[in-house]
Image (cartoon, coloured by chain):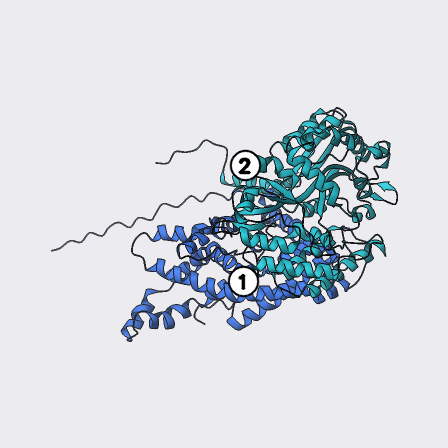
C-alpha cells in the first residue's frame, strides 16, 4: 500500500504593495521634466543654428558690405550676383570634382578596412583603434602636417625625400594647378582623416549580418569570397552604404579646413564654403552676397540629398531592400 | 555587498543638476570676454589689436608701452592669424571691436566712418613725418592714421654665391631670370618671391612704369608693360629656378638663411636676422625694371595705428595714440630699430637711428628713398585681392595676362564705383 503525501499547498504571502508616492507641483509633471531636459539643447539650437540661418536669409536680400545690420533692401540682386559670379559657379565645379573622387574612394576604402578588420582573429580592437584614431585629429592640424611636413615643396618634405632617392627633382605640390598635384595632397589628407570613422559604421553593419545567411549560402553552393560578398554582404550593407554616401556627400559639400589651409589665397581648388568665406569674411566683407551663396548652397544640398535618397532608397529602414 | 551611500545625491538630483548646468553653459558662453580684462593703467579700459610680428620681443614691447601709460588700462590683442585683415574686419563689426588697431591706410575705412580723424593730434607734428606717409593717410585734408613703421621691401642675396656663379646684380627682370637659372643648383633654387607671389605684385607694376591707380583714382596697372612683366614672371615661375612651396613665406628670412635659395624677396625688418645667419655675405637690390621703359622699385610698406570711430572710447583712444605714437619718441625709436630694422616715419627719429646710418641698413634706407613707392589709400583690400588673383591666374596658372587683368579691372571698377561714385 502506498501512501502518497500531497504537499500542502501554501498560498504565497501577499506582497505588500507600497502606495505610490503622490507627486505634487512641478516635480510631478512629466511635461515640466520634458522641457527641463529639452530646453537647454533647444535654446542652443535656436540661438546658434536657427537664428543665424534666419539672419543669413534676411541678409541675403540686403546690401550688407562691412555690416551685419544693413538697411538697403536690394531684393534678389545678391542671388543674381552669386549665380553669375564665375568664382562661385567654378567653386561648385571644384566641389563636383572633389566629391566625384572622394565619395567613392572613401566608401571603398572604409568598406575595405572594415572587411579586413572584421576578418581578424586577434588584435581586432587594436587595428580598429589604429584606423579610427585619425578621426580624432583636427583637420587644420592634419592639413598643416600635410603641407609643411609630408608635401612640403622643398627637399626635406617627406614626399620629395622619397622621390629624391629615385633621382626625381623636388615637386612643389601646392604651388601651381598645372599639374594639379594639390588634389593628391587634399585627397590623401581627407582619406586619412575620415576613412576610420566610416570603417566603424561598416564594421558595425558587418557584425549585424546574421551568420545563418552565410551558412545557407554555403549550403546552396555559393563560393566564399567575391560571390558571397557580392550577393550576401553588399546587399546587407545597403542601408549603411546609403547613409555613408549621404554623409560623405554632405561632408564634401562642407569641405573647408583642408582647402583653406592647404591652398592659401589661390584662384583654384576653392570649394563653395571657401569661396563663401572669402566673399563674406574675406577682404570684400560682403555679408549679403555671402549669405545668398549660403542659401543657394543649402538649397542645392537639400535637392541632392532628396534625389540621392530617392535613388538609393534612404529612409525605407529595411536592410534587405 | 554593495555599500550604501549616505549621500543626499540621488539619480534625479544629479540629472536635474546636469540639466541646470546645460542651461547655464550656453549662457556663460555668451560672456563678455572682449579683450579688456587686464591692463595696468587706471581709469578707462582700452583694447588694441596688433598683427603678430615675426621678430622676437615685439609683443612684449607693445605690452610694455601700454603698461607705461597711466591714463588708461590698455589691453593688447596679438593676432597670429595669417589673415589679419579678415579677422580685423570681422571684429570691427562686433561689440568686441578694438578701440584702436594696426592696419594700412585704406579709404573704405574712412568712407564707412570706421576710423577717426586724427588731424588734431597729427597736425602739430605733421612736418616731422615723412611727407609720403602723411599723404598716404590723408583724405580731403584730414589725417586718419599715424604711421608707426616704414618697411621697405627688396631683394636680399648672397654675394658669395653670385661670385661663384659669375652673376652680377640684376638690373632688369630678364637679368633676374638669367641669374636665377645660373644660381640654381641641386639643393638651392635661384630665387624666392614668396609662396604665392603676392608680395611682388605692386613692385612688378611699378617696375613696368605703371601704377595701381592714377591721381584721379582710375585704373593705371593695365598696361602693355605690366602684361610683358606678367609673361616674364610666368617664364621664371615655370623655369624650375624659383623656390616654390617653402616652409615659410617671403616675410621670414629662413629660405635664404637656410640655403634654400640664393636670392630672396623680403623686407628690411628681417635684416638683423639675415645678418645674424649670414654675416657679411649679404647684399640688397631693388625689384629690377620689368621693361626698358620701366624703373626699379621698392615697396615702402609698413603699419599704422587707427582709432575705431565706432568704438565707445574714441577720445581716450586718441589720447593714447597721441601719447605713444606722437609724444613718446623713445618708444617709437625702440619700436622701429630694436627688434627688426624698420625706418621710423618721424624724420627726427630716423635721423638719430644709428643702426640705419651705415652698412646694409644705410643701403636699405637709400633704396627706400630712391625707389620707394608708398601705399595708395584708394587701393583697398578688395582691389589688392583682385590683383593677387592676377598673379594666381596668369603666373601660377598660366592663364592669359590680358584676360586676368580684365577680370581684375571688373573687380576694381566695382570697388571704385562704390567708393568714388
Q: Nearer the viewer, residue B306 or B394?
A: B394
- Residue B277 horizontal/vertical position (percent): 54, 36
Residue for point 67% across, 59% down: B230
- In the displayed structure, does residue A6 sit left or right of residue A157? left
Determine whether, in the image, residue B8 is placed left or right of residue A263: left
Badge 2: residue crowd in 10 Å (few <14, some 14–19, many ≥20):
some
Element assignment for label 1: loop
Assign the N terminus of chain A to one quadrant of the image. Answer: bottom left
Q: Quadrant of residue A90?
A: bottom right
| Colour-to-chain, cyan | B
Categorize mark 1 by other alpha carbons within 10 Å: few (<14), some (14-19), many (20+).
Answer: some
Q: Nearer the viewer, mark 1 or mark 2?
A: 2
Is A230 above or below relative to B172?
below
Residue A189 visible in the snapshot:
yes
Q: Residue furthest right?
A: B141
- Element type at mark 2: helix
Q: Do we see residue A240 in this rendering? A: no
Q: Position of residue B333 (x, y in %)?
A: 71, 29
Which residue in the protein does label 2 denote? Answer: B277
Q: Position of residue A170 (x, y in %)?
A: 48, 55
> Where does label 1 land, which residue?
A180
Residue B62 spot, x, y in % from top left: 68, 31
Identify the hue of chain A: blue
Amino acid at each position: 500500500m502506498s501512501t502518497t503525501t500531497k504537499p500542502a499547498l501554501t498560498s504565497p504571502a501577499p506582497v505588500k504593495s507600497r502606495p505610490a508616492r503622490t507627486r505634487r507641483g512641478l516635480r510631478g509633471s512629466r511635461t515640466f521634466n520634458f522641457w527641463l531636459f529639452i530646453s537647454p539643447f533647444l535654446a542652443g539650437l535656436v540661438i546658434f543654428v536657427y537664428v543665424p540661418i534666419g539672419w543669413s536669409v534676411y541678409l541675403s536680400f540686403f546690401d550688407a558690405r562691412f555690416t551685419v545690420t544693413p538697411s538697403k533692401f536690394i531684393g534678389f540682386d545678391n542671388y543674381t550676383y552669386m549665380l553669375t559670379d564665375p568664382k562661385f559657379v567654378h567653386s561648385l565645379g571644384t566641389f563636383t570634382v572633389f566629391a566625384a573622387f572622394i565619395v567613392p574612394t572613401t566608401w571603398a576604402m572604409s568598406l575595405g578596412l572594415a572587411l579586413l578588420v572584421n576578418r581578424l582573429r586577434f588584435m581586432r580592437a587594436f587595428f580598429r583603434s589604429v584606423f579610427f584614431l585619425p578621426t580624432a585629429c583636427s583637420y587644420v592640424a592634419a592639413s598643416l602636417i600635410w603641407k609643411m611636413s609630408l608635401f612640403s615643396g622643398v627637399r626635406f618634405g617627406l614626399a620629395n625625400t622619397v622621390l629624391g632617392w629615385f633621382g626625381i627633382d623636388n615637386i612643389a605640390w601646392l604651388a601651381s594647378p598645372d599639374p594639379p598635384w594639390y588634389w593628391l595632397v587634399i585627397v590623401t589628407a581627407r582619406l586619412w582623416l575620415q576613412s576610420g570613422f566610416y570603417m566603424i559604421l561598416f564594421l558595425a553593419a558587418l557584425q549585424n549580418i546574421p551568420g545563418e545567411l552565410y551558412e545557407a549560402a554555403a549550403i546552396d553552393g555559393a563560393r566564399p569570397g567575391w560571390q558571397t560578398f557580392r550577393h550576401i554582404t553588399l546587399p546587407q550593407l545597403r542601408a549603411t552604404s546609403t547613409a555613408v554616401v549621404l554623409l560623405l556627400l554632405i561632408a564634401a559639400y562642407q569641405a573647408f579646413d583642408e582647402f583653406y589651409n592647404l591652398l592659401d589665397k589661390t584662384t583654384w581648388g576653392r570649394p563653395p564654403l571657401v569661396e563663401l568665406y572669402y566673399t563674406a569674411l574675406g577682404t570684400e566683407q560682403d555679408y549679403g552676397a555671402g549669405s545668398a551663396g549660403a542659401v543657394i548652397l543649402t538649397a542645392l544640398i537639400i535637392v541632392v540629398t532628396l534625389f540621392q535618397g530617392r535613388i538609393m532608397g534612404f529612409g525605407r529602414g529595411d536592410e534587405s531592400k | 555587498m554593495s555599500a550604501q551611500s549616505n549621500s543626499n545625491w540621488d539619480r534625479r538630483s544629479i540629472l536635474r543638476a546636469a540639466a541646470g548646468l546645460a542651461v547655464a553653459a550656453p549662457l556663460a558662453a555668451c560672456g563678455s570676454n572682449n579683450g579688456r580684462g587686464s591692463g595696468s593703467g587706471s581709469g578707462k579700459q582700452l583694447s588694441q589689436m596688433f598683427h603678430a610680428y615675426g621678430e622676437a620681443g615685439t609683443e612684449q614691447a607693445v605690452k610694455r608701452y601700454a603698461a607705461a601709460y597711466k591714463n588708461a588700462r590698455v589691453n593688447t590683442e596679438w593676432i597670429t592669424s595669417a589673415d589679419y585683415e579678415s579677422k580685423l574686419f570681422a571684429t570691427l563689426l562686433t561689440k568686441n571691436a578694438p578701440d584702436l588697431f594696426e592696419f594700412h591706410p585704406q579709404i573704405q575705412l574712412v568712407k564707412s566712418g570706421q576710423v577717426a580723424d586724427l588731424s588734431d593730434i597729427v597736425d602739430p607734428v605733421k612736418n616731422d613725418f615723412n611727407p609720403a606717409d602723411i599723404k598716404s593717410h590723408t583724405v580731403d585734408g584730414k589725417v586718419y592714421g599715424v604711421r608707426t613703421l616704414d618697411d621697405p621691401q627688396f631683394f636680399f642675396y648672397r654675394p658669395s654665391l653670385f661670385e661663384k656663379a659669375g652673376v652680377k646684380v640684376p638690373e632688369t627682370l630678364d637679368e633676374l631670370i638669367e641669374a636665377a637659372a645660373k644660381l640654381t643648383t641641386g639643393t638651392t633654387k635661384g630665387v624666392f618671391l614668396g609662396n604665392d607671389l603676392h608680395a611682388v605684385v605692386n613692385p612688378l607694376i611699378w617696375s613696368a612704369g605703371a601704377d595701381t591707380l592714377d591721381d584721379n583714382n582710375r585704373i593705371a596697372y593695365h598696361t602693355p608693360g605690366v602684361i610683358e612683366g606678367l609673361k616674364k614672371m610666368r617664364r621664371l615661375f615655370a623655369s624650375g629656378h624659383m623656390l616654390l612651396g617653402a616652409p615659410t613665406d617671403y616675410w621670414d628670412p629662413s629660405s635664404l638663411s637656410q640655403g634654400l635659395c640664393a636670392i630672396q624677396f623680403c623686407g628690411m625688418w628681417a635684416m638683423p636676422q639675415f645678418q645674424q645667419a649670414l654675416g657679411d655675405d649679404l647684399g640688397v637690390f631693388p625689384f629690377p625694371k620689368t621693361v626698358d621703359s620701366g624703373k626699379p622699385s621698392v615697396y615702402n610698406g609698413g603699419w599704422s595705428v587707427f582709432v575705431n570711430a565706432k568704438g565707445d572710447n574714441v577720445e581716450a583712444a586718441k589720447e593714447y595714440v597721441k601719447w605713444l605714437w606722437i609724444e613718446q619718441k623713445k618708444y617709437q625709436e625702440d619700436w622701429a630699430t630694436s627688434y627688426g630694422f624698420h625706418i621710423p616715419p618721424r624724420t627726427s627719429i630716423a635721423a638719430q637711428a644709428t643702426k640705419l646710418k651705415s652698412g646694409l641698413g644705410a643701403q636699405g634706407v637709400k633704396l627706400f628713398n630712391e625707389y620707394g613707392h608708398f601705399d595708395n589709400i584708394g587701393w583697398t583690400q578688395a582691389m589688392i585681392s583682385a590683383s593677387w588673383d592676377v598673379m594666381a591666374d596668369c603666373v601660377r596658372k598660366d592663364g592669359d595676362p590680358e584676360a586676368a587683368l580684365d577680370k581684375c579691372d571688373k573687380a576694381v571698377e566695382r570697388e571704385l564705383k562704390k567708393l568714388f561714385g
